[in-house]
Image: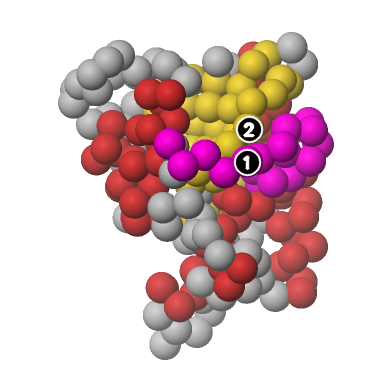
Amino acid sequence: MKLIVGLGNPGRIYIDSRHNIGFSLIRTLSRIYKIPLKKDNHTFSLSGKGRIEGQNLILALPLTFMNLSGIAVSALLKKYKIDLPQPLAREERGLENLLVVCDDLDLGVGRMKIKSSGSAGGHRGLESIIDSLGSQEFCRLRIGIGRPLNKNIDAVDYVLSSFTRKEKEEIKEIIEKACDCLRVWVTKGITESMNIFNPALSTA
């Protein structure tokens, strides 16, 4: 069983924000593969179980707000017994069946990068997950949202802003490619995903 978690903030006010690109991708996967997302109070998430090309997986959207994403991810791993022993031990270990989708300020709009592990890189959602799991050894797909051209715009305000009309076309294209990337991750694994998608997209 694999778990794909998209990061974002719950609530209509945040739906189209740059910070919610992870939510947007999971909702797109939900539609494509007909995996309905339902509220689960035990995992503090919207989640659904389904299959991609015969492979079982869980799609999830934490409802804890970005900075507390780790609470939901820990609960999801425990409920579905994905890679995680009971009780949760705080030690470095691989979580190869977990992938987290998040926004990235350091990647331009229309770019993405998939990795097998790594630091939070200043992303509060990833920081929360790493702290909760006691490990940074989990897959992540970062989708670029760019940085503000105006240096006077605060980063917090920027990530909570909406994409421009031109950017929305680029985001539509990258979400389609990201869906294909996640399909490969589910069916063939992280190495194949990195080999196919990082060389083609990291220099776009």
Q: Which residues are magenta?
A: 25-42
What residue is at 60 percent from the left and 55 percent from the top?
Answer: 21
Residue at the extreme bottom of the image, as rendered = 152
Number of labels in the image equals 2
> Which quadrant, please, contains the N terminus?
top right
Say the numbered circle drawn on residue 38.
1
Q: Are marks 2 and 1 in contact (CB under 8 Å)?
A: yes
Nearest to the observer: residue 185 or residue 24: 24
Question: Label 2 crowding class (10 Å Cα cut-off): few <14, some 14-19, many 20+?
Answer: some
**Quick one: SS at disc 2?**
strand
Quadrant for residue 178, please give it: top right
- Above or below, 151 against 34 in this view is below
Say the numbered circle drawn on residue 19.
none
What residue is at 40 percent from the left and 41 percent from the top?
Answer: 72
Residue 31 x/y as whole percent: 79, 41
**Quick one: SS at disc 1?**
strand
Nearest to the observer: residue 197 or residue 23: 23
Q: Amino acid at mark 1?
A: Lys
Q: CA distance from mark 2 to mark 1?
A: 6 Å
Quadrant for residue 29, please give it: top right
Q: Amino acid at mark 2?
A: Gly
Q: Report which residue position mark 2 lands on.
A: 48
Residue 31 within the segment the image draws in magenta:
yes
Single out the mark in the foreground, 2 or 1.
1
Residue 187 within the segment the image draws in magenta:
no
Nearest to the observer: residue 106 or residue 34: 34
Residue 164 x/y as whole percent: 70, 75
Q: Is residue 131 in view?
A: yes
What residue is at 53 percent from the left and 27 percent from the top?
Answer: 3
What residue is at 76 percent from the left and 74 percent from the top?
Answer: 165
